[in-house]
Amino acid sequence: MIKLIAPERIIETSRLLLEPLVPAHASVIYEQLLDKRLYQFIPQSPPISLQTVESRYLALSSRLSPDGQEGWLNWVIRFRESGVYIGTLQATVHANCTAAIAYTIFPLFWRQGYAKEGCSRVLEHLFEEYRVSFVTVDIDTRNIASIRLVEALGMKRTFTRTNADFFKGSVNDEYRYEAVSPFTPLSGSVVE
C-alpha cells in the first residue's frame, strides 16, 4: 500500500498555490473544463455534466486507488494573489517508487510559464517527499507545446509508441518523457 505524505497540504510556488483536489472544486472550474481546446491531444472530451466532474473528483479525493497500489495526488492550481483558478495537476505514485504526471492549464493562461512552474514544483515534491526514482509523462507527438514544456523541465524522451490510441477520428502516436531523481531512492519509501 502506498504511504501518502501530507496529501492535504497546499504546495506553493512563487506565483501559484496547488490545492489538493476536492469535490467542491468541480463547480469552481467546471466552465473552464468545457473548453474543447483542452482535449485536442487526449482521448477525453469535455465533461457532460457538473455531476460527472463532482463524482470523478470524489473518487480522486480518496488519494488512493481502490487496491492501495497507487497514490492519486491531484491539485487545482490557482494564483497566490488573486485566487483565480488556472488549471489542474496530477501525479500518480506507483508502489514501485515511480510516478507519472499530467497537467491541464486553462487556455486563457497558456504560454505564461504556469505549467512549467507548477510541474517543476510537483517534480520536486515527488523526488523529495515520495523519493520516487523517476517520473514519466506521455504526450501526443503532435502536442508541440507540451513537448517543449517537458524538455524545458529537463525531461528526456525515452520511448515512442506508435498507434498509441485512436480518438477524434485519427490514430495518435505518443512520446514518453522521463525525469530521473537527483536523490538516491529510499527502498520502499512510499510503500507501507
Image (spheres, grey):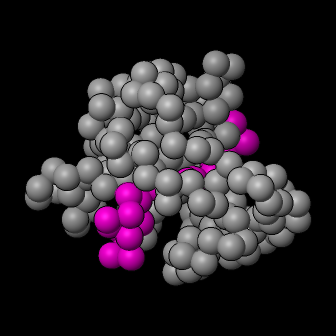
- Residue 107 percent across, percent down from the top left: 38, 63
- Residue 162 percent across, percent down from the top left: 88, 65
Query: Compared with residue 180, is residue 97 higher up or lower down, i.e. above or below?
Result: above
**Magenta residue span:** 95-115
Residue 8 seen: no
Query: Compared with residue 50, is residue 175 higher up or lower down, i.e. above or below?
Result: below
As for residue 111 lying within the magenta part, the answer is yes
Q: Quadrant of the C terminus?
A: top right
- Residue 163 percent across, percent down from the top left: 88, 60
Q: Residue at x 68, y 73 (%)?
A: 142
**Of residues 127 and 42, the one drawn nearer to the viewer in this rendering:** 42
Q: Is residue 162 left or right of residue 9?
A: right
**Of residues 91 and 106, the one drawn nearer to the viewer in this rendering:** 106
Residue 45 seen: yes
Q: Residue at x 25, y 59 (%)?
A: 16
Query: Compared with residue 17, is residue 190 higher up or lower down, i.e. above or below?
Result: above
Q: Is residue 20 left or right of residue 133?
A: left
Return the residue found at the far right.
162
Q: Quadrant of residue 19?
A: top left
The mark total stands at 0
**Of residues 85 and 181, the one drawn nearer to the viewer in this rendering:** 85
- Residue 182 percent across, percent down from the top left: 57, 68
Return the residue found at the far front.
169
Q: Quadrant of residue 20?
A: top left
Q: Is residue 41 left or right of residue 89?
A: right
Q: Quadrant of the N terminus?
A: top right
